[in-house]
């Protein structure tokens, strides 16, 4: 079934570019375009629309305000932000993702126009796979909430030998992808601290956006969140996010754990990669207790990393299917039998809090 799509952008040129690209993609039906957020909302009220490409910056009602209205009035609609490459655009895009935008694509700014179009089309096709998956798993039908909601979310604890569980934890390592900014914006502010362990995190993102994510989380949280830098010492109670487009690893230097940043080959088509981080965490913290957390995301990045950590006795928490934007990365870990506890998102912060403060109960 074709996805009915609306383009919202105040620029005539970009509305035309996006319309031409979408017309070439199978399984899409154009519902038209709108030059403003207010006109987009009127269009949504008039007909059922599945997918909105929404410009981040628009006069009158910007992308964030439009997104808030769409989330409130038309919760079944999947919204993907179209962002520029400026710091201001990155900050606003992160805010939109934390509010529930499914994903974002960047407006290319290269000198080669044909390459820009090809990149834009490739990005749209990629995000459409996610939108279609979301449509299949959405608890809503039509543009309004269904009367019946999904069944209650419960935690599932797997039987694990207590002998292999760390009594104390030297580090918490988090892997997350699609839906991550929203998940992290709920999880991290719920952490009170102080902790006797650092937190390291890979969120799949391109350059620039992870710095905005870290700054946003710090403003909302009781713990300090930073974009990791080369050779930076990992100190307890602080969270380090892999810089977009670069791998984050943990190294030993002068008896201390430090961050390492590199441009090694992508793994699972990802850079930064959760697997790369998790393997390095095992090499440094393997005998000091590792708490691994795998949150919402497409694909299986993190699964082989958790498997490697398990050989060193790590404890692993995965986000439950019902609370994931995409149950891909956690599912890979669950189905491999590597998860010790599958929890709804709202229960993960208290679990991390308890384990980092008090160790195994």
Image: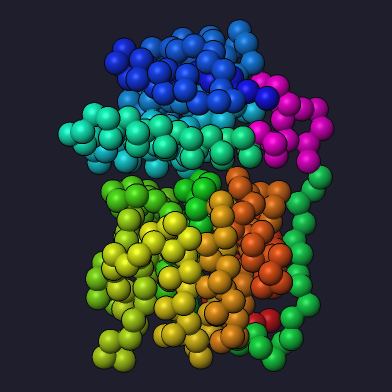
Which residue is rendered at x = 52% and y = 73% of the image? 305
Q: Is residue 2 left or right of residue 151?
A: left
Q: Can residue 68 be seen here? A: no
Q: Position of residue 270 (x, y in %)?
A: 43, 57
Does the magenta run of residues contain 139?
yes
Per the rendered image, the range of residues in magenta is 135-150
Q: Position of residue 107 (x, y in %)?
A: 31, 32
Determine the main secondary structure of the stretch shown in magenta. Answer: loop
Give the quarter of the figure containing the C terminus: bottom right
Q: Can residue 205 be seen here? A: yes
Does the magenta run of residues contain 113?
no
Which residue is rendered at x = 61% and y = 47% of the image? 326
**Marker count (numbered):** 0
Which residue is rendered at x = 28% and y = 87% of the image? 253
Q: Is residue 270 left or right of residue 255?
A: right
Q: Position of residue 355 (x, y in %)?
A: 59, 76
């Amino acid at each position: 079934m074709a996805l009915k799509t609306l383009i919202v952008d105040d620029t005539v040129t970009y509305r035309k570019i996006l319309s031409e690209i979408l017309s070439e993609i199978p399984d899409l039906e154009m519902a038209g375009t709108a030059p403003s957020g207010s006109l987009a909302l009127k269009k949504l009220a008039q007909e059922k629309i599945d997918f909105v490409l929404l410009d981040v910056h628009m006069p009158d009602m910007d992308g964030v305000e439009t997104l808030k209205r769409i989330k409130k009035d038309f919760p079944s609609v999947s919204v993907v932000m179209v962002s520029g490459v400026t710091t201001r655009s990155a900050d606003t895009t992160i805010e939109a993702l934390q509010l529930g935008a499914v994903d974002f694509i960047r407006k290319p700014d290269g000198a080669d126009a044909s390459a820009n179009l090809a990149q834009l089309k490739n990005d749209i096709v990629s995000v459409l796979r996610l939108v279609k998956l979301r449509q299949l798993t959405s608890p809503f039908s039509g543009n309004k909430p269904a009367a019946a909601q999904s069944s209650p979310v419960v935690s599932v604890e797997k039987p694990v030998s207590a002998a292999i569980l760390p009594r104390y934890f030297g580090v918490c390592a988090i892997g997350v992808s699609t839906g991550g900014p929203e998940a992290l914006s709920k999880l991290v502010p719920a952490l009170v601290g102080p902790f006797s362990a650092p937190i390291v995190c890979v969120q799949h993102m391109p350059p620039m956006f992870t710095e905005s994510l870290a700054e946003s989380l710090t403003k909302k949280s009781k713990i300090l969140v930073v974009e990791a830098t080369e050779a930076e010492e990992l100190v307890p109670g602080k969270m380090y996010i892999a810089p977009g487009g670069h791998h984050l690893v943990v190294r030993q230097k002068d008896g201390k754990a430090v961050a390492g940043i590199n441009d090694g080959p992508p793994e699972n088509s990802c850079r930064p990669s959760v697997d790369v981080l998790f393997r390095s965490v095992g090499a440094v913290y393997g005998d000091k207790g590792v708490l691994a957390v795998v949150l919402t995301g497409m694909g299986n990045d993190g699964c082989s990393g958790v498997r490697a950590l398990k050989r060193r006795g790590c404890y692993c928490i995965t986000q439950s299917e019902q609370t994931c934007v995409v149950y891909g990365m956690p599912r890979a870990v669950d189905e491999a039998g590597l998860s010790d506890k599958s929890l709804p998102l709202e229960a993960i912060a208290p679990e991390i809090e308890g384990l980092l403060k008090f160790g195994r109960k």
